[in-house]
């Protein structure tokens, strides 16, 4: 077990794993890493279980001292990391010597960077998961984002170091996308044909008000008249991760990892499972588009992604 | 179970609708299916989100498709009739209405052409059923509001609503457990903590559970302050 001293927390740094499923009846959403592909690959580089807890940094990273050293891997977006001033590669396991300081800065690519540590970040689990749910102050490290002076512990490790990295080739399909593939939402037909066409033809911009709960978009309004035969107010129902709901104002919101578990706004579409990790790398002002795919295609893309993630040749010496 | 409708919500979730409107019967069926799936879980189901007249089922999309799940669920549905549910708990929630605690009280009164006092009287007159918990941990959807209080949601949700705020939307009412965004019209605020996390991790306490019966008790600002100190 080794310590991590938080010297600077960054903009929003939280402990995340793959989330807690199964507590929907209490209104508890899964939470978990915004970009689970990056978390899983980071853990694989370290020989951790896929779902070991790591630090998720947002837009601006922190500065961390390792008094006893550690083995770490940075994945996700490029936050200009240095170890005692020496630039550090992403997607590579790195041995940190006792007393060294890891410093991250502003992002140079997407929204989130993961600091994975051999043994994982050790926190008391809440409902079976280490994930922080910021909105309700549950889980993770004291239910909140990290602050200066916090001291984290890592879990037990075998203590061995093998330098591993992500293969140069072959992981292109895992890279974050700006064209998000979607399936029709359960209320797609509550939108007039003109709104549906507008939705698929237009670019939407991610706004500053976006967070782990949802990504608020700006672009063409989707509040055309509701076709006859459909109610003006819908009955609140369960909502899925990646649901694209449209409040009466007409601007879409994509529900994200700390999502509400139920909602009363119409959903025009839903981001497919395989493209959910891409949402975690979208920054404010990024522009996105939506592409409709069928149920079979969505499933094929997921199977393809999982096969790629599980491939032995993805991680090399 | 003739009027059941299945609707894919995403590539990893399926909605089961027991009708398209809030009815006692539809909600009974939701509760029954929820209880049955909790007592006899299906391995590839990852989460359940009950609501008024629907149940959203999240499943492992690597193992199942919508059609596979629908076929399994039809066998469960055949067994719902006659499934017994436990006796509901009765819970009273003190509320300080209006002023800073209920910023939408006057507007709601104006929308219905009645006095704010009448809105309070109506809201506190009914016994509500906890239809389900959703939105955020411990947020209970209570119904139904007296017909004279049915009011649409805000056009644009507030970015943040204080914890304990009591709101209405459509024919629903509920209490916000945490400071969250919210589109319901706020009538008042309660000092009760709706969701207490147990850091041990196994049994967090939600004040309300699905199926409970709830009444609101109007209290003064002084009483609210006293209860908050307690």
Image: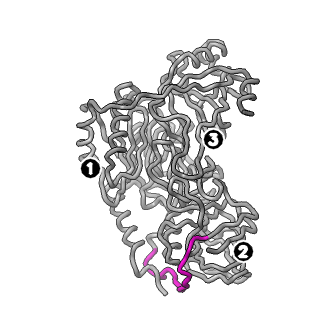
**In-front residue for pair B93/A111:** B93
Please provide percent x and percent y for residue A257. 53, 53
Residue depth check, mark 2 versus mark 1: number of the one nearer the observer: 2
Is A239 drawn above or below residue A133 in the view shown?
Answer: above
Element carrying mark 2: strand
For the N terminus of chain B, the quadrant is top left
The chain identifier of the residue carrying mark 2 reads A
A74 in the magenta segment: no
Could you give the CA–CA distance between mark 2 and mark 3, rounded to whole angstroms? Answer: 34 Å
Is A73 drawn above or below residue A220 in the view shown?
Answer: below
Task: Please tell me if label 2 and label 1 are on a single chain.
Answer: no
Pick whichever of labels 3 and 1 is earlier in the sequence: 1
Which range is magenta?
A154-171
Few, some or many C-alpha atoms within 10 Å of disc 3 (few <14, some 14-19, many ≥20)?
many
Could you give the CA–CA distance between mark 2 and mark 1, rounded to whole angstroms? Answer: 52 Å
Mark 2 lies on residue? A65
A157 in the magenta segment: yes
Please provide percent x and percent y for residue A131. 56, 58
Element carrying mark 1: helix
Q: Quadrant of residue A182?
A: bottom left
The residue located at (56%, 80%) in the rendering is: A92
The chain identifier of the residue carrying mark 1 reads B
Mark 3 lies on residue? B178
**In-front residue for pair B221/A91:** B221
Scheme of colours in the image:
one colour
Please provide percent x and percent y for residue B161. 66, 37
Is A162 drawn above or below residue B103 in the view shown?
Answer: below
Q: Main secondary structure of the magenta part?
A: loop
Few, some or many C-alpha atoms within 10 Å of disc 2 (few <14, some 14-19, many ≥20)?
many
Please provide percent x and percent y for residue A251. 55, 43
Element carrying mark 3: loop
Residue A92 seen: yes
């Amino acid at each position: 077990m080794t310590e991590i001293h938080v010297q600077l927390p960054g903009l929003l740094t939280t402990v995340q794993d793959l989330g807690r499923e199964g507590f929907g009846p209490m209104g508890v959403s899964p939470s978990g890493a915004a970009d689970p592909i990056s978390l899983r690959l980071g853990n694989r580089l370290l020989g951790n279980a896929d779902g070991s807890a790591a630090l998720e940094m947002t837009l601006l990273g922190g500065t961390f001292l390792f008094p006893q050293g550690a083995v770490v891997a940075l994945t996700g977006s490029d936050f200009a990391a240095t170890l005692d001033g020496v630039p550090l590669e992403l997607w590579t396991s790195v041995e940190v010597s006792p007393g060294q300081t890891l410093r991250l800065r502003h992002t140079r690519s997407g929204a989130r960077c993961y600091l994975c540590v051999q043994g994982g970040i050790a926190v008391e689990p809440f409902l079976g998961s280490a994930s922080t749910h910021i909105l309700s102050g549950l889980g993770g490290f004291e239910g909140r984002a990290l602050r200066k002076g916090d001291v984290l512990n890592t879990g037990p490790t075998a203590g061995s170091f093998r330098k591993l990295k992500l293969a140069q080739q072959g992981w292109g399909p895992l890279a974050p996308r700006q064209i998000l593939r979607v399936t029709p939402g359960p209320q797609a037909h509550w939108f007039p044909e003109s709104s549906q066409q507008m939705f698929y033809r237009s670019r939407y911009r991610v706004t500053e008000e976006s967070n782990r709960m949802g990504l608020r978009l700006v672009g063409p309004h989707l509040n055309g008249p509701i076709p006859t035969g459909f109610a003006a107010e819908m009955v609140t129902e369960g909502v899925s991760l990646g649901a694209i709901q449209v409040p009466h104002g007409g601007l879409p919101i994509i529900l994200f990892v700390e999502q509400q578990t139920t909602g009363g706004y119409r959903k025009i579409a839903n981001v497919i499972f395989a493209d959910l990790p891409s949402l975690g790398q979208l920054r404010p002002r990024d522009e996105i588009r939506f592409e409709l795919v069928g149920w079979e295609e969505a499933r094929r893309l997921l199977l393809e992604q999982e096969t790629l993630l599980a491939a032995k040749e993805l991680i090399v010496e | 179970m003739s009027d059941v409708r299945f609707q894919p919500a995403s590539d990893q979730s399926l909605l089961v609708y027991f009708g398209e409107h809030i009815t006692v019967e539809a909600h009974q069926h939701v509760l029954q299916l929820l209880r049955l799936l909790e007592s006899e879980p299906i391995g590839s189901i990852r989460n359940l989100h009950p609501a008024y007249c629907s149940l959203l089922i999240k499943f492992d999309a690597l193992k199942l498709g919508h059609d596979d799940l629908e076929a399994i669920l039809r066998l469960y549905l055949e067994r719902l009739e006659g499934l017994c549910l436990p006796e509901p708990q009765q819970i009273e929630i003190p509320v300080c209405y209006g002023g800073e605690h209920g910023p939408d009280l006057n507007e709601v009164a104006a929308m219905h052409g009645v006095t704010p006092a009448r809105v309070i009287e109506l809201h506190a007159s009914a016994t509500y059923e906890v239809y389900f918990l959703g939105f955020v941990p411990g947020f209970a959807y209570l119904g139904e509001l007296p017909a004279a209080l049915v009011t649409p949601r805000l056009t644009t949700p507030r970015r943040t609503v204080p914890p304990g705020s009591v709101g209405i939307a459509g024919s629903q009412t509920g209490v916000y457990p945490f400071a969250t965004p919210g589109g319901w019209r706020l009538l008042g605020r309660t000092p009760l903590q709706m969701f207490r996390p147990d850091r041990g991790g196994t049994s967090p306490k939600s004040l309300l559970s699905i199926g409970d019966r709830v009444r609101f008790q109007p209290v003064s600002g002084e009483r609210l302050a006293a209860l908050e100190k307690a």
